């Protein structure tokens, strides 16, 4: 076997497995981290609570209830990524979630930045969500256009 044949085979393997791996990875991250919130075990809860305090429009619900619902929302996103045919539902939910998770970069700069373009650990945790968006884009790229 020459290098070109090996290379072609490896690329073929990646093309066949990229979408299923992205789905499983998204499921694991969203379901696991969501369930940690539901169970009150999430290390992200202090950051979520600080952001919650900034959101005056959420004053009708306690943080504890919000955190459980937010965790259930995350877990739901994870489950939906496993089922083919639900992409047009889960991708918008994911982007809604991503909009909320990027908020601390702007609303809580003292928590997420230690200097100009130097994120704190919390900031790095948030910025890495760009990889989640890339994985979701991989899933979306395998959709077939809607028919008229």
Image (tube, rainbow, N blue to C red):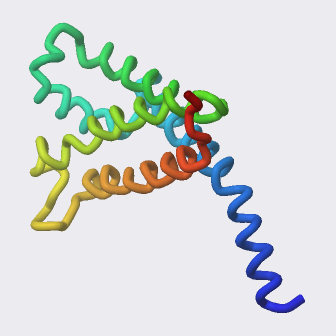
Position in image of residue 12 (x %, y %): 75, 67
Quarter containing the C terminus: top right
Instruction: Residue 83: name its quadrant.
Output: top right
67 or 58: nearer the viewer:
58
Residue 113 lies, with reference to residue 144, above or below; the image says below
Check the image and name the residue furthest to the top: 60
Quarter containing the N terminus: bottom right
84 or 98: nearer the viewer:
84
Q: Residue at x 61, y 47 (%)?
A: 142
Q: Is residue 15 left or right of residue 72?
A: right
Q: Residue at x 31, y 58 (%)?
A: 124
Instruction: Residue 107: name its quadrant.
Output: top left
For the image, the number of numbered tags is 0
Instruction: Residue 45: name its quadrant.
Output: top left
Q: Is residue 56 left or right of residue 145?
A: left
Residue 5 lies, with reference to residue 71, above or below; the image says below
Q: Is residue 30 left or right of residue 5?
A: left
Position in image of residue 76 (x %, y %): 51, 25
Residue 145 lies, with reference to residue 128, above or below; the image says above
Check the image and name the residue furthest to the bottom: 2
Check the image and name the residue furthest to the right: 1
145 or 24: nearer the viewer:
145
Position in image of residue 140 (x %, y %): 53, 44
Q: Residue at x 19, y 52 (%)?
A: 112
């Amino acid at each position: 076997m020459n290098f070109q044949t090996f290379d072609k085979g490896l690329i073929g393997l990646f093309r066949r497995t990229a979408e299923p791996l992205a789905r499983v990875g998204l499921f694991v991250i969203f379901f696991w981290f969501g369930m940690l919130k539901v169970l009150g075990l999430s290390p992200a809860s202090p950051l979520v609570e600080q952001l919650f305090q900034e959101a005056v429009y959420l004053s009708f619900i306690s943080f504890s209830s919000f955190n459980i619902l937010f965790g259930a929302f995350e877990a739901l996103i994870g489950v939906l990524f496993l089922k083919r045919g639900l992409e047009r539902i889960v991708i918008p939910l994911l982007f809604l979630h991503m909009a909320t998770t990027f908020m601390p970069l702007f609303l809580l700069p003292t928590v997420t930045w230690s200097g100009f373009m130097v994120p704190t650990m919390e900031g790095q945790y948030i910025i890495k969500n760009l990889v989640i968006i890339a994985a979701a884009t991989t899933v979306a790229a395998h959709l077939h256009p809607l028919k008229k």
